[in-house]
Image (spheres, rainbow, N blue to C red):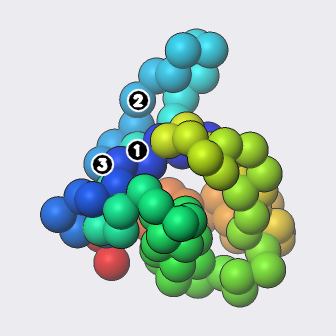
Amino acid sequence: MAVRVTPKSSQNRILGAAPDAEGGMVLRIGVTAPPEDGKANEALVDFLTKGLRLPRRDLAIVQGAANRRKLLRLSGDPDMLYTRINSFIGQGTT
């Protein structure tokens, strides 16, 4: 799953979807943590694991740890992940 993180946001929340430079779509997510010492990455993982109700071991940043655009690996049943992601996107914040 491709995401674009906005650190130092007013709250942890989903900001919406947007096209990326490669022609695909990214999920825009704001986190309150600053982009230093991995704090924004940690906040992103915490936000998504809680919102998607996933164990931490089932979500990993596989590309872009030092960039705003990140590629995430989600492990688990594809149907369950699809349902949870759609539900979570509809909620917007946690």
Residue located 29% across and 67% down the image = 32
Of mark 2 and mark 1, the one earlier in the sequence is 2
Task: Specify the amino acid type for callout 3.
Answer: Leu
Q: What secondary structure is marked by label 3?
A: strand
Location of residue 40 with respect to 1 vertically, above or below: below
* Left or right: 31 as drawn, with respect to 57: left
Amino acid type at mark 1: Arg
Mark number, residue 77: none
- Quarter location, residue 69: top right
Q: Position of residue 23 (x, y in %)?
A: 58, 13
Is residue 92 something one can see in this rendering? no
Q: Is residue 78 left or right of residue 86?
A: right
User: Which residue is depicted at the point 35% across and 48% down?
Assistant: 6
Q: Which mark is residue 15?
A: 3
Left or right: where does residue 57 sit relative to residue 15?
Answer: right
Question: x, y (%) of residue 86?
Answer: 50, 58
Quadrant assignment, res 87: bottom left
Marks 2/3: CA distance?
9 Å
Q: Is residue 23 above or below residue 58?
A: above
Q: Earlier in the sequence, mark 3 or mark 1?
A: 3
Q: Nearer the viewer, residue 51 or 62?
A: 62
Q: Which residue is mark 1?
A: 28
Q: Secondary structure at mark 2?
A: strand
Tag 2–tag 1 contact (CB < 8 Å): yes
Q: Is the C-beta separation of discs 3 and 1 under 8 Å?
A: yes
Residue occupied by mark 2: 18
